[in-house]
Image: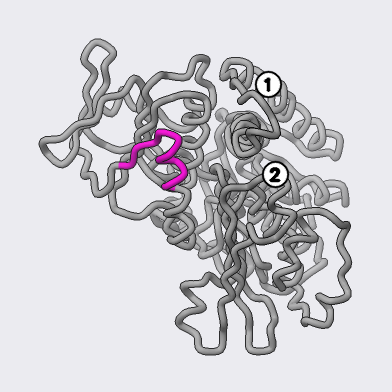
Amino acid sequence: MSTNTYDYDVLYLGSGHGTFDGAIPLAAQGVKVAVVESGLVGGTCPNRGCNAKITLEAPAALANQVSEMQGLVNPALTLNWQNTVAHKHEVIDALPEFIADLMKDNGIALIKGRGHFIDSHTIIVNGEKISAEKFVIATGMHPHQLDLPGRQIVNNSNAFMNLKKLPKRIAIIGAGYIGMEFASIASAFGSQVTVIMRANKALRRFHQPFVEKIITKLNHTGVTFIKNANINSFSDDFGNKAIHYNDTEKIEADWILDATGRIPNTTSLGLEEIGVDYDKDGIIVNDYLQTTIPHIYASGDVIKKKQPKLTPTAIFESLYLMKTFTGATKQPIVYPAIPSTVFTTPRIARVGITPEEAAEDENLTVSANNILDNWYRNVEKEAFGENKLVYTKSHQLVGATEISNHAEDVINTLLPAIELKLTPEQVGRIIHIFPTIGSAAWENL
């Protein structure tokens, strides 16, 4: 790449996984790289997403395991929210500096501020013009907020993960990833939780019979679900907050969370002025992750795409662009099988073709397995355990969905069989450590 005309070869807007996983090895190969970031380095996942969430969820998962093992382990655990939030900060607070140092050590210029395009090769940051031969827009997403009267009393997911004291009554609007995971966490820590759903289905992208089992489990822990609720407004009567819905009904709470989704960060970038197309779902790209301007690319959650908007997807895209920019590949991006997990208790995880999709294809079969029949699942006395595996006529695994305490580990274990299209003979040559959850996972194949 030539830097004679431009300040940088490649300039990234945003510093999350859609950027740094690929930008660091790109710069290490001598490419002149800059990253513009207005907030915490590392973006959503390390600072207010995956890393923070799983740290808050770990005690809840442990408490569930101890509860299921009562009679073998006594007494039940007592969870401490304040200490858990403090521990979360111990885990994540050093990450922005760590990631920034990795960038700087590899020669990346880290520019603090917000970038705005003034032409297709130039942005302005803090009043300074900066040019680049290529750009990567990796600005991610932010929490959606319902635009209703009284919305100023409603909080988002960032606020939940920083609560110093957990409210006694929490109302959560939305039953997607965030709503279901936070309901599970808050309930485990002792809050009385109500989940308000716009329709009658939670976690729509997951196998609904398994989702209903999670709802049943959350019901048993005290979580209330209100379905088909059309929210009208919010009110606050001296600290007693309320959600008004279906014209005449209301639910009262001490704290309200809006978990109605996330919105791509596409505004205030100057995209309209230079002709980069986007819509409410994100920036439109081709199979090379190019926008409507060929030397401007996009990566991560800001892209409009069919693939799950998850950290591993952003990492894959960032590394693909690194290979593209160095000439290591000239091929379009080909996404692998991307697994996805909801970290409720129990977990639900999936990859590949779903049971619903398989039911519409006569060339596929679905095997339903009560995995609690496996002796190893009884070691921890798991109360929930079921999976459905999707096969071709030649018994090649092409999809898997599981509900269990270890669903994410099972799907990770089965993933190579799906992505690498292993034949039954090849699967038979894989020997796992025994006894482990991985070994148990493959017994159903």
Q: Is residue 314 left or right of residue 264?
A: right
Q: Secondary structure at mark 2?
A: loop
Q: Are marks 1 and 2 in contact (CB under 8 Å)?
A: no
Q: Between residues 430 and 163, which one lies in front from this camera angle?
A: 430
Q: Which mark is residue 87?
A: 1
State the image quarter where residue 140 is shown.
top right
Query: Which is nearer the N-term, disc 1 or disc 2?
Result: 1
- Residue beneath the point at 71% across and 29% down: 96
**Extent of the magenta region:** 215-225
The amino acid pointed to by label 2 is Glu
Residue at which label 2 appears: 380
Regarding residue 201, the answer to whether it shows in the image is yes
Q: Between residues 268 and 241, which one lies in front from this camera angle?
A: 241
The amino acid pointed to by label 1 is His
Q: Nearer the viewer, mark 1 or mark 2?
A: 2
Residue 313 location in percent, x, y? 64, 56
